[in-house]
Amino acid sequence: MKKAMGFVAVVIALAFSTTASAGRPSMNECFEGSEFIGNAALSRDAGMPATAFLDRMEEDFVLIRAFPNELRWFVHDADDESFLLHETSEVFDHPEPADDHRRAFLHACVERMAAPEASDRENSEPVAKPGKT
């Protein structure tokens, strides 16, 4: 079990998938993140306690911060960590089949990916309504 959890840190830190900017996951990261969430549900089903899984994730986040952003998978900043930790907590707090958690995560991740960044909202000009000048 410890070996598998250590693997999580390596995968998160060293995956060379297409990365996105902090707070904005790529589609690839969303798919891979949904697989991670599905595997968290399978770990739960195999008897892994929530505290053990979530504590290990937080330890892994500390290790991951040592890597440059471009080498990280999914957890590029504190907001990413919070999002992934929250979604993983849901797996343990509200047990559902792994595929249901995977699907819910993918939906939430894609919404997060599509949401405008704060700097985008601040720099955009208001759009006039049609027919109004």
Image (tube, rainbow, N blue to C red):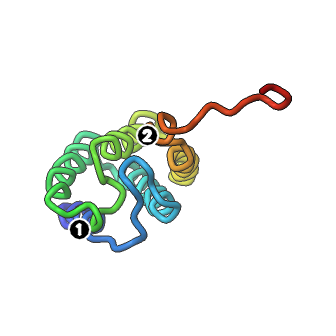
Q: Who is closer to the viewer here, 33 or 48? A: 33
> Going by the picture, which residue comes out furthest to the right?
131
Q: Is residue 23 left or right of residue 125?
A: left
Task: Tell me which residue sits at (20%, 44%) in the image.
Answer: 55
Mark 1 vs 2, N-terminal side:
1
**Where's residue 13, x and y in %?**
25, 64
**Where's residue 48, x and y in %?**
29, 49
Task: Tell me which residue sits at (58%, 51%) in the image.
Answer: 103
> Going by the picture, which residue comes out furthest to the bottom?
16
Q: Secondary structure at mark 1?
A: helix
Quadrant position of residue 111: top right
- Mark 1 residue crowding within 10 angstroms, few (<14) / some (14–19) / many (20+): some
Q: Is residue 3 left or right of residue 31?
A: left
Q: Is residue 63 left or right of residue 85?
A: left
The kind of residue tagged 2 is Ser
Quadrant for the C terminus in the image: top right
Q: Secondary structure at mark 2?
A: helix
Quadrant for the N terminus in the image: bottom left
Instruction: Confirm or deny contact between disc 1 and disc 2 (CB under 8 A).
Output: no
Q: Who is closer to the viewer here, 1 or 99? A: 99
**Where's residue 90, x and y in %?**
42, 38
Task: Tell me which residue sits at (32%, 49%) in the image.
Answer: 47
**Where's residue 86, x and y in %?**
37, 38
Q: What residue does disc 1 label? A: 10
The kind of residue tagged 1 is Val
Residue 119, which numbered label?
2
Q: How many marks?
A: 2
Q: Is residue 125 left or right of residue 41?
A: right
3D distance between C-alphas at marks 1 and 2 = 32 Å
